[in-house]
Image (cartoon, rainbow, N blue to C red):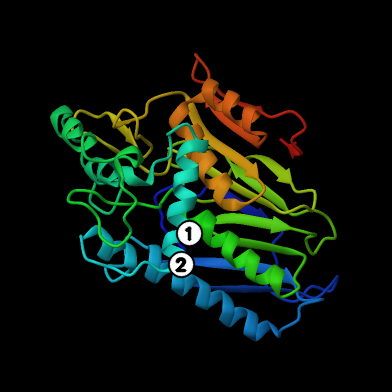
Amino acid sequence: MKIRLLSIIISVVGIITSCSTRGHYVSLTGYAQGGTYAVTFNKAGATVPVKQLAEGIDSILTCIDTTLSGYNPGSMLSRYNRGEIIAPSPMFEEIFAIAKDVFTQTDSTVDVAAAPLFDLWGFGFTEDKAPSDSLVAGVMARCGMELFSGDLTQASPGQKLNYNAIAQGYSADKVAEYLQKAGVKDMLVDIGEIFCCGKSPAGRGWRIAIDTPFDGNMTPGAETSAVWEADGSPKGIVTSGNYRKYYLSPDGQKISHTIDPRTGRSVSHNLLSATVIADDSCTADAAATACMVMGLEKAKEFVVRKGYEAFLIYSDEEGLMKSWNTEGLNVSQ
């Protein structure tokens, strides 16, 4: 699901576009929510034909779009946010339950019920704009998970949900789950965020390049800072950063797309990008966002405490780009 709030700054190293001579690898690509996806897997052991798998993937992504996309005016989420009465689907209920857990697990830094704040700052489903302090205070008074009743049939006046921080990771996990149930063991699912497990066509763990986070680096893979290699176990890998999604206020101030729901303000710190590896893509998605809200030092403490692997890129006091990673992370620079 291509809900492009977060900058996608991960690129795949060595992905194939046809059957590999080293196995029965195929790559399926398509369009989803205004973007593209690529799913590469070894069809050996699959219990259903590749064509049926492709149709299944498209069906999953269509369901996610019609349920969770804030850019699709006819989706269940859009209708809910407009205050319409809906009959929440199992998927709608599931992701809300996930979001409640994410809110707790990220120390309140990832809050899907802070949607009015994202709109106010211009990073939700509205145009870019820098709000006044009074506007921020007014919106803060009526949004946030702690004030949310949890009624999924109709939103209270002024309240909205925005799943941008977890929807792409959730989508990758759903596709991976579908493939695993069909007997697929080696795969890389790239739907804006990445899930991988098993071996790549090269017979080794999947290798993922992490882009260098400088302003103006708009092409994934054009300039990279490190390469992470998976160990074959199921992993989600997500990078969040502020160097592709921002705008300048009338006075020239850089307004990043990362909004701290606890303060209602756009964050300002020296952490440039956060790559997080977790057991699933949805968790990695939320954790990467949380790191960008927290800033460098708190992000370090957070990933270590949670047991995630992470690669953080930041600028030092002299403006030089530096990196930090968790102990034992299989990364080369």
Give me the disc on residue 295.
none
* Image coordinates for residue 160, horizontal then vertical, percent: 27, 51
Residue at image location 26% in from the left, 41% down from the top: 143
Crowding at dot 1, Cα within 10 Å, few <14 / some 14-19 / many 20+, comes out as few
Q: For the residue marked with disc 1, what is the amino acid? A: Glu
Residue identifier under label 2: 90
- The quadrant holding residue 138 is top left
Q: Nearer the viewer, residue 198 or 64?
A: 64
- Up the image or down, 280 lies above or below 180; here it is above
Q: Nearer the viewer, residue 223 or 230?
A: 230
Query: Horizontal placement of 206 versus 136: left or right?
Result: right
- The quadrant holding residue 197 is bottom right
Residue at image location 71% in from the left, 85% down from the top: 49
Regarding residue 160, the answer to whether it shows in the image is yes
Q: Nearer the viewer, residue 258 or 151?
A: 151
Residue at image location 45% in from the left, 73% down from the top: 63
Query: Horizontal placement of 271 versus 234: left or right?
Result: left
Residue identifier under label 1: 94
* Image coordinates for residue 54, horizontal then vertical, percent: 60, 79
Q: For the residue marked with disc 2, what is the amino acid? A: Pro
Query: Horizontal placement of 213 versus 19: left or right?
Result: left
Regarding residue 322, the answer to whether it shows in the image is no
* Image coordinates for residue 111, horizontal then vertical, percent: 39, 41
Q: Nearer the viewer, residue 66 or 247?
A: 66
- Up the image or down, 141 lies above or below 268; here it is below
Quarter of the image for the C terminus: give it: top right
- Up the image or down, 213 lies above or below 153; here it is above
